[in-house]
Image (cartoon, grey):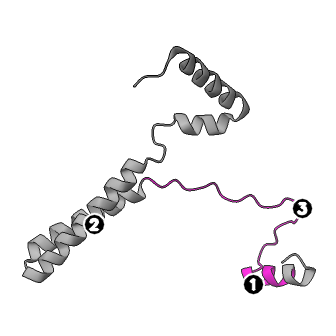
Amino acid sequence: MGLTEREQKLLEELERGLAESEPALAQKFREPNAASPRRLIAGALLALAGLSILVFAVMTQIVVIGVIAFLVMLGGLFLASSNVSVPNAPQTSKSEPKRSGGSFFDDRWDRRRSGDL
């Protein structure tokens, strides 16, 4: 079922508005490598199938099938995890200069003493 001409114009107008107000978000929607639920579901199903075959191979004690099943399971996990995008690194505050030579615990203790934590 296609969109009517009026709905298509409205959709194009909404897309232009999004591109003008939030260019980064609009670009993310246009990316072909954006997160896809199909890849996640396909990877999870492939991993589950590999796990099932692996259990069967252990029950029948056939090593070759077990190795193949393990590789299928790893392939499914790789497919599902390749769908995940890593968020940007958190921005540090510019007001507090970084000291060199201090450890994580020293910094945390200093923040606790100053009341920031």
The residue mark sitting in front, 3 or 2, is 2
Describe the element under mark 1 as helix, strand or loop.
helix
Residue ID at (12%, 82%): 59
Numbered mark located on residue 92 in the image? none
Observer able to see residue 108: yes
Instruction: Kindly give the residue lying farthest to the top in the view shown.
Output: 5
Residue ID at (49%, 43%): 34
Describe the element under mark 3 as helix, strand or loop.
loop
Q: Is residue 84 magenta?
A: yes
Q: Quadrant of the C terminus?
A: bottom right
Q: Residue flagged by tag 1: what amino acid is it? A: Phe
For marks 3 and 2 on the same chain, the one whose residue lies earlier in the sequence: 2
Q: Are marks 3 and 1 in contact (CB under 8 Å)?
A: no
Q: Quadrant of the N terminus?
A: top left
Q: Is residue 84 left or right of residue 1?
A: right
Vertical side of 52 occupied by 112: above or below? below
Residue ID at (34%, 61%): 44
Q: In the rendered structure, which segment of residues is drawn in magenta?
A: 83-110
Q: Which residue is mark 2?
A: 48
Q: Which residue is mark 3?
A: 95
Q: Residue 81: x and y, percent?
A: 41, 59
For marks 3 and 1 on the same chain, the one whose residue lies earlier in the sequence: 3
Q: Residue flagged by tag 3: what amino acid is it? A: Ser
Residue situated in front as seen by the camera: 14 or 89: 14
Residue 116 falls in which quadrant of the image?
Answer: bottom right
Chief SS of the magenta region: loop
Q: Which residue is mark 1?
A: 105
Rounded to the nearest angstrom, the CA distance separating label 2 from label 1 is 42 Å
Vertical side of 48 occupied by 58: above or below? below
